[in-house]
Amino acid sequence: MSQYSVLLVDDEEDVIAGFLLTGMVGILSGCSLRQTREAESIKIGVTVYDQYDTFVSQMMEVFKNYAGEKEAETGIAITIEMYNAADSQTTQNSQVESMINDGCDVVCVNLVDRTEPTTVIDMAEKNNVPVIFFNRELVEEDLERWERLYYVGAKAFESGIMEGEIAAAAFQNNSSSDKNGDGMIQYLVLEGEAGHQDAIVRTEYAVSTIVESGIDVEKVGYAIANWNRAQAQTKMAQLLPEYGSEIELVLANNDDMALGAIDALKAADISRNDWPVIVGIDGTDVGLEAVKKGEMIGTVYNDKEGQAQGILNLAFALSTDGNLSELALEDGKYLRLPYAKVLPEDVDAYLK
C-alpha cells in the first residue's frame, strides 16, 4: 500500500490548504535532517508557476502517482510539499525559502521567470539543498552556477519542428485547406509569453519548418495569450472580425491556447467547414480529445509521464545519496524527454 503524503500549501494565507493521505504517513518531521539511503522517509518540495496550467497540473498528478509507486518499490516514505506560485516570482522565492526551512531534502522548481533564478539558487546553495528545475528552462549559465542544480524537460525547438510538420502535411494533403487558393498559408500565432524562450522557439521553428517544406506563408495575426485558454479565446475573438476569413492556420504554442481559438470559433458561430487548420503542443487530455474530434488537426505530445518520472527518480536519488549515473543525465545536469507528433489516426494510443 502506498504511504506517500502530499501537503498542498496556499501561500496567500500561509496555511495548509489540503492534506492528501493514502495509508500510513511517514514521520512528517523526520526530514529536518538531510536523509541518507538508510532513512525511513524523505521530503520533496515542489513549486509550480501556476497550478491551473493544464499541462503542469496533469504532470503533477502523474508525479504524485509515481511517488506512491516509488514508496512501494523502496519502502521509503515520501512526503511531497507542493506550492502554487500563482505566476509570481517573489512568491515562489518565498516558497523555496519555506521548503528549505521545512527540511526538504530537494526542491523542485517550475520557474515563474526563467531569467530570475538567482534568489532560488543562492538560498539552495547556502543551505546545500539540491534544486531540480523543470518544464520552464532557465538560462544555461545559471544552471552551471552550482553543481547541485538540474533540469528536467524537453527541447523546445523539437516541438516547433513537429508542429510545423503537422501543419505543412495538412496543407500538402488537402488543397481545400488553402481557402483562398493563392498557394500560400495565411497564419495566426497564439504565443505563450512575451519574451519566453519556449514560446519564441516553438513559433520560430514551426514557421521555418513550414517554409522549408516548400510552402509560402504570410502572417496575418499575432497575439500573446500566456498559455491560457480563456485569454486565447478573448484574443481570437478580437482578431476574427478583422482577419477571420483570411486565417487558414492557427499555430498555438500549447493546446490550451489552441482550444481557446476553437472556443472563439464556436462562439462566433463559424461553420466547421470554414475553420482554419489548428495545431497545438503538449498533448494534454483535452487537447487529445480535440484531435480525436477533428477540431485540431494534431498536437505535439510533451511527455508528462516521462518528465514526472524523471523528476521523481532524480529527486529520490538526490535525497538518498543515490547513483545519478543510472539516470543518464546529459552533461550531468539535464534530463530531456522527446516529443512525439499526434494525429487523429494515432490519438487513441495517447489517450490511453
Image (tube, grey):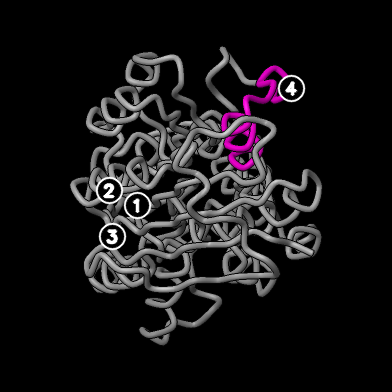
Q: Nearer the viewer, residue 139 or 293?
A: 139
Residue 320 lies in the magenta-colored region: yes
Q: Which residue is mark 4?
A: 326
Q: Report, in whole angstroms, how far the alpha carbon at label 3 lies from the one at label 4.
A: 34 Å
Pointer 4 or 1: first along the chain: 1
The label shown at residue 49 is 1
Q: Dot 3, crowdedness within 10 Å: few (<14), some or many (≥20)?
A: some
Q: Report, in whole angstroms, how far the alpha carbon at label 1 lies from the one at label 3.
A: 6 Å
x then y, percent, for residue 185: 45, 49
Residue under the point 40% across and 62% down? 51
Which range is magenta? 310-328
x then y, percent, for residue 339: 64, 40
Q: Which residue is mark 2?
A: 92
Quadrant including the N terminus = bottom right
Amino acid carrying label 4: it is Glu
Examine the rendering and report whether any part of residue 257 can be seen.
Answer: no
